[in-house]
Image (cartoon, rainbow, N blue to C red):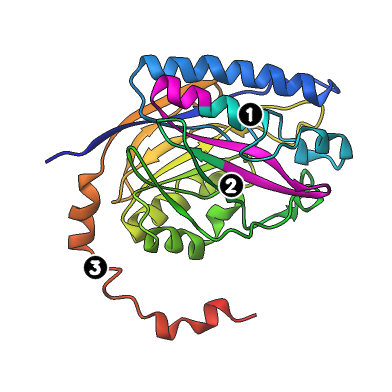
Amino acid sequence: MPRLVKAGLIQATSTHTGNADPAAIRVAMIDKHMALIEEAAAQGVQVLCLQELFYGPYFCAEQQIRWYSITEQIPNGPTTQLMMETAKRLNMVLIVPIYEVENTGVYYNTAAVIDADGTYLGKYRKHHIPHCHPGFWEKFYFRPGNLGYPVFQTAVGKIGVYICYDRHFPEGARCLGLNGAEIVFNPSATVAGLSEYLWKLEQPAHAAANGYFVGAINRVGMEAPWNIGEFYGQSYFCDPRGQMVKVGSRDQTELIVADLDLEMIEQVRNTWQFYRDRRPESYGAIVAP
């Protein structure tokens, strides 16, 4: 018996064109995404994920404290509250990446998970924080995540989140599977010439190794004034066999929609008994310092 979920991803260009006020950029980007969220609702999308740090440019291309000004509390901040109202109004599960403040000077790269009735279910904080290659200065902005690898029971199924650089680490991807994830969303910001050769390799491998669906998102376009590279889009869904279901364009703001049959998860796991055949007692070296 099919268990179909209509899922969506939003990839978008930034409205940032120079040294505009971060608060003004946030307003413009939220407005842009609200229109795309409405479009998703019109297409019957039941669960929708936005891109990493969706209400700004990828500001980690520089090290400037002015970007601290757009941090927000979760769930009490204005963006989470807006998305809770929107999720309830549209009867849609939302995964919303936000620059989170816990205390003054303590900031995280976070995604809030909101159920279709508007209930805030919890958040995932990005674990693996890069500080490498000119233009990816994330340790200036974020502490490493400290909330584990939660999986959220939503109206459409069990949802897990991984964020951008996390995708290079199979350990957390396995933890999400062990915690019961049926769909794992990975909102990202990644550029050509650096990681593109891995983009359609790593996450389909996670999907196949763990028997779940993956929704991978990348923003699009060049972002001035930094121009660290082309954000090459190609957001996609892949199934538990690691096969592509739907792939977005390289250079356009776009809503990517796919029907995911969650019944496939059981079929795949009954064929490939990776969870049965694990040998956790032999894996100590993986977590050794």
Q: Which residue is mark 3?
A: 273
Distance in Å between CA atoms under marks 3 and 2: 28 Å
Instruction: Give the quarter of the image for residue 78.
Output: top right
Q: How many marks?
A: 3
Rendered image: mark on residue 276: none
Whole-percent x, y for residue 163 in the image: 57, 47
Q: Which residue is mark 1?
A: 79
Q: Which residue is mark 2?
A: 164
- Residues at marks 3 and 1 touching, judged by CB atoms closer than 8 Å: no
Q: Which residues are magenta?
A: 85-111
Q: What amino acid does circle 1 point to?
A: Thr
| The C terminus: image quadrant | bottom right
Q: Earlier in the sequence, mark 3 or mark 2?
A: 2
Q: Magenta span has 231?
A: no
Whole-percent x, y for residue 228 in the image: 75, 36
Whole-percent x, y for residue 266 in the image: 20, 54
Q: Compared to 285, does 156 lie above or below?
A: above
Q: Residue at image x 48%, y 20%?
A: 37
| The N terminus: image quadrant | top left
Q: Earlier in the sequence, mark 2 or mark 1?
A: 1
Query: On the rendered structure, is 174 left or right of 125?
Result: left
Q: Residue at image x 54%, y 20%?
A: 252
- Dominant SS in magenta: strand
Quick check: can you spot residue 52?
no
Other residues around mark 3 within 10 Å, as few (<14) / some (14–19) / many (≥20)? few
Quick check: can you spot residue 128?
yes
Q: Nearer the viewer, residue 18 or 73?
A: 73
Q: Earlier in the sequence, mark 3 or mark 1?
A: 1
Q: Compared to 8, does 174 lie above or below?
A: below
Query: On the rendered structure, is 257 left or right of 1?
Result: right
Looking at the rendered structure, the secondary structure element under dot 3 is loop
